[in-house]
Amino acid sequence: MARLTILTAKEIQALYGLPQLSDEEQDAFFTLDVREKQQLDQLRNVTASVYFILHLGYFKAKKQFFVFELQEVSDDVAHILHRYFPGVTDLPTLIISKPTRLVQQEDILRLLDYQMCSQEWKKKLQEKANKLVTIYTKPVYVFKELLNFLEHHRVVLPGYSFMQEEVIGKAMTGERKRLEQAVIGGIPEEQRIKLGNLLTAEESLYQLTLLKHEPKDFSYQEVQEEVGKRTLLADLYQLATRFLPNLHISNENITDLGRSK
């Protein structure tokens, strides 16, 4: 099966890439409230303080944490030094340790009332995706709904590969298998053959496509052809009215599936 594609490279960068802040955004995201300033005051050196403000501002911008070196974000560092540490021109070090970074992340989550996507939340995310694929056939719609779900519950968005393969990919594969089993168990073989014939190419056109053609006029031949179409589809229509509601998929999904044929 082809690899699932949900977002374009540009969309992935916009969602997951390190923020590129304008002057106005720097002013907004690097502004500290009382509790945030109290947390900043507990830090022992300027480098750790700068990293804290950066991590906090970037999290406010994208609700994610990033690993970076100060050289990569020199404009933001200059803004922070000018605003909060006007007497500092050079930082004593340009890195902080991983334990310090992780502690800062925990502090930021607490300050902003967020939580990481734990195993429990990953399970909930999968359950939500399993329900969404019965509503949407396009994975990008499922992805957007999961973004809203995580934001509503103030949970940090997991990485794109995890969302793509582990959550949405598994949900869509599971739904496809569920529908396949429903068709095998719920549609008699004779009618499955008739449905298959509708998807058989004839003179470069599918029978289903030919059935959609409107009559050219009201001549006897054209009317007879329309009667023949009705006769062909009558029992399949009766089957559809009984079978489709038992699939537990949305009308939108049924419509999208029909358009894709």
Image (cartoon, helix red, strand yellow):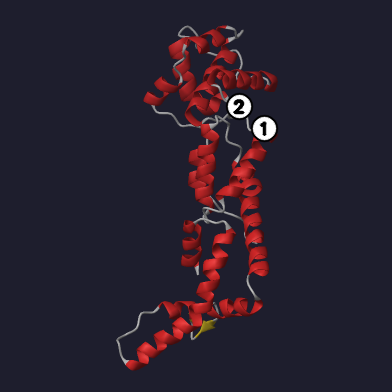
Q: Which residue is depicted at the point 49% across and 86% down?
A: 203
Residue type at numbered disc 2: Gln
List x then y, in percent, for residue 73.
51, 26
Q: Which mark is residue 127?
A: none
Quadrant position of the N terminus in the picture? bottom right
One can see residue 95 in this view: no
Q: Where is residue 56 in the image (x, y as percent from the top left)?
A: 53, 21
- Please state the horizontal and vertical placement of residue 71, each as a whole percent of the image: 54, 26
Q: Distance between the residues labelled 2 and 1?
A: 8 Å
Q: How crowded is mark 1: few (under 14 residues within 10 Å), some or many (20 or more)?
A: few
Residue under numbered circle 1: 118
Q: Quadrant of residue 102?
A: top right
Say whether residue 216 is left or right of residue 155: left
Q: Which residue is at the front of the view, 55 or 245?
A: 245
Whether 129 is drawn above or below 65: the answer is below
In the image, taking residue 83 as reference, residue 56 lies left or right, namely right
Instruction: Find numbered disc 2 in the image and state the secondary structure of the residue it sits on.
Output: loop
Residue 186 in percent (x, y) is at 64, 68
Return the residue nearer the eye: 175 or 164. Answer: 175
Q: Mark 2 points at which residue?
A: 115
Task: Identify which residue, 61 or 145, lies in the foreground.
Answer: 145
Q: How crowded is mark 2: few (under 14 residues within 10 Å), some or many (20 or more)?
A: some
Work out whether 138 lies above or below 213. Answer: above
The residue type indicated by label 1 comes to Ser
CB under 8 Å between discs 2 and 1 = yes
Residue 93 shows in the view: yes
* Residue lying at 45% horizontally and 87% vertically, measured from the top left: 228
